[in-house]
């Protein structure tokens, strides 16, 4: 049984590779993905893992990425980043290329009221309900096989969040942030409002 396992792993070749930057091949892979996952955690409390889409991710250079965080039911990522900054981003292919790519680093939140907002927000479509930008410095990149990730076909983006945000309007979004986005589920502050 053990011998068979090593033969199987040997046949697959090296299943994980590490890089100290987001190389061109990694960037091309990221650009083709329609979904990514964000994971953050504090030393204590719950770990947050969120799926993201809607063309909200950009690689700015070999060590810097940014994503647009749209209004949602919770605001865990912002709370965790304010309290420590640890972040893992994951991309995986659901089509012909079996690959999982993880970006490890430190992230921080930029709010619409911050001077840096104007520097980065232009990288993204003008989605209604823009809540924060997350800027991350990446210090480790890992690729691994995606042999166990099933095939799924991309059919398009959902429109519900955009319609909901447009219907709420700017003041409605602010009211929603005040009611629902100021603390994490563990009671940590998100600093969404000044």
Image (cartoon, helix red, strand yellow):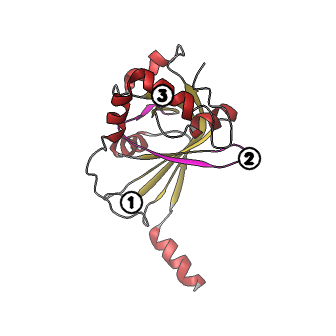
Q: Nearer the viewer, mark 1 or mark 2?
A: 2
Question: How many other residues sit within 10 Å of disc 2, few (<14), some (14-19) or many (≥20)?
Answer: few
Separation of marks 3 and 2 at Cα, in angstroms: 25 Å
Left or right, residue 44 beside residue 137: right
Residue 75, disc: none
Q: Position of residue 159 (x, y in %)?
A: 30, 40
The residue pinned by badge 1 equals 98
Q: Quadrant of the N terminus?
A: bottom right
- Write the residue at 63% across / 35% down: 183
Residue 14 position, x and y percent, is 51, 63
Q: Nearer the viewer, residue 176 or 136?
A: 176
Residue 188 visible from this viewpoint: yes
Q: Residue furthest left?
A: 155
Q: Quadrant of the C terminus?
A: top right
Mark carried by residue 131: 3
Residue on which disc 2 sits: 44
- The stretch of residues the image draws in magenta is 41-62
């Amino acid at each position: 049984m053990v011998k068979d396992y090593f033969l199987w792993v040997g046949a697959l070749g090296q299943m994980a590779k590490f890089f100290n930057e987001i190389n061109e091949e990694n960037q091309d892979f990221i650009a083709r993905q329609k979904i990514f996952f964000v994971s953050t955690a504090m030393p204590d409390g719950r770990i947050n893992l969120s799926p993201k889409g809607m063309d909200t991710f950009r690689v700015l250079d070999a060590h810097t990425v940014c994503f647009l965080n749209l209004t949602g039911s919770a605001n865990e990522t912002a709370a965790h980043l304010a309290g420590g900054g640890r972040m893992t981003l994951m991309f995986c292919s659901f089509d012909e290329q079996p690959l999982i790519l993880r970006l490890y680093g430190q992230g921080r939140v930029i709010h619409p009221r911050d001077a840096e907002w104007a520097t980065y927000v232009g990288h993204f479509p003008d989605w209604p309900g823009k809540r924060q930008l997350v800027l991350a410095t990446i210090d480790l990149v890992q690729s691994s096989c995606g042999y166990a990730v099933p095939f799924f076909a991309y059919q398009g983006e959902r429109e519900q969040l955009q319609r909901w945000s447009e219907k709420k309007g700017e003041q409605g979004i602010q009211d929603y942030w005040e009611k629902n986005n100021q603390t994490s589920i563990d009671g940590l502050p998100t600093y969404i409002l000044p």
